[in-house]
Amino acid sequence: MNRAMLIGRLTKDPELRATGSGIAVCTFTLAVDRRFANRDSQTREADFIPVVVWRAQAENCAKYLHKGSQAAICGSIQTRTYDAPDGTKRYITEVVADEVQFLGRPNNGDNNEDAARAASLGNSPFGDNMQAVEDEEIPF
């Protein structure tokens, strides 16, 4: 079984290209925090995973994702090789994503702030009868 599921943030804007036959391909790098903090410095380290997305999903990634965007991806790990200009053989390991979920916006907290901001401006997406509730007031 070859299945990878990752959640992280893009390290730079995605790059959209097309193959010679016109198929869209988008590449980006996802920074994924490690589960545990570093023993010495107590800071979390991250891994930088190259991701490849094809066809319509590639076009959507290029359109809606940007540096700092949070995304969840599911796909398979693939390794490929190529010959570098200096004659050495190079290996690349990347995740070829077949599912991409756009999770949030950078430096914006969660999407509840968007709804609260819209409600304060009189444009509540939930109707006029909605009231803000603090997390401590929720019974579960």
Image (cartoon, rainbow, N blue to C red):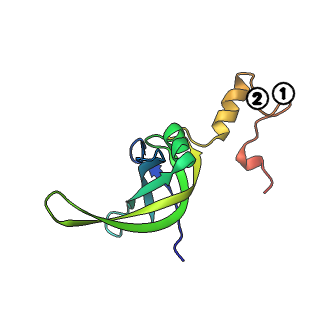
In the foreground, 131 or 122: 122
Is 84 positioned to the left or the right of 139 in the image? left
Is 11 positioned to the left or the right of 63 in the image? left
Q: Mark 1 falls on what kind of element?
A: loop
**Residue highlighted by disc 1:** 128
Image quadrant holding the N terminus, namely bottom right
Query: What x and y, as percent, mark residue 85?
Result: 16, 57
- Residue occupying the point 48% across, 47% down: 23
Label 2 close to label 1 by CB (< 8 Å): yes
Disc number placed over residue 124 in the picture, else none: 2
Residue 126 visible? The answer is yes
Q: From what the image shows, is residue 117 above or below residue 96?
A: above
Disc 2 to disc 1, C-alpha distance: 7 Å
**Which residue is most to the left?**
86
Image quadrant holding the C terminus, namely bottom right
Query: What x and y, as percent, mark residue 87?
Result: 15, 63
Residue type pointed to by label 1: Asp
- Residue occupying the point 50% across, 67% down: 76
Is 23 positioned to the left or the right of 125 in the image? left
- Residue occupying the point 75% across, 22% down: 122
- Residue occupying the point 38% across, 68% down: 79
In the foreground, 84 or 111: 84
Q: From what the image shows, is residue 8 above or below residue 92?
A: above
Disc number placed over residue 3 in the picture, else none: none
Residue type pointed to by label 2: Ser
**Which residue is most to the front?**
21
Task: Determine the image quadrant of residue 127.
Answer: top right
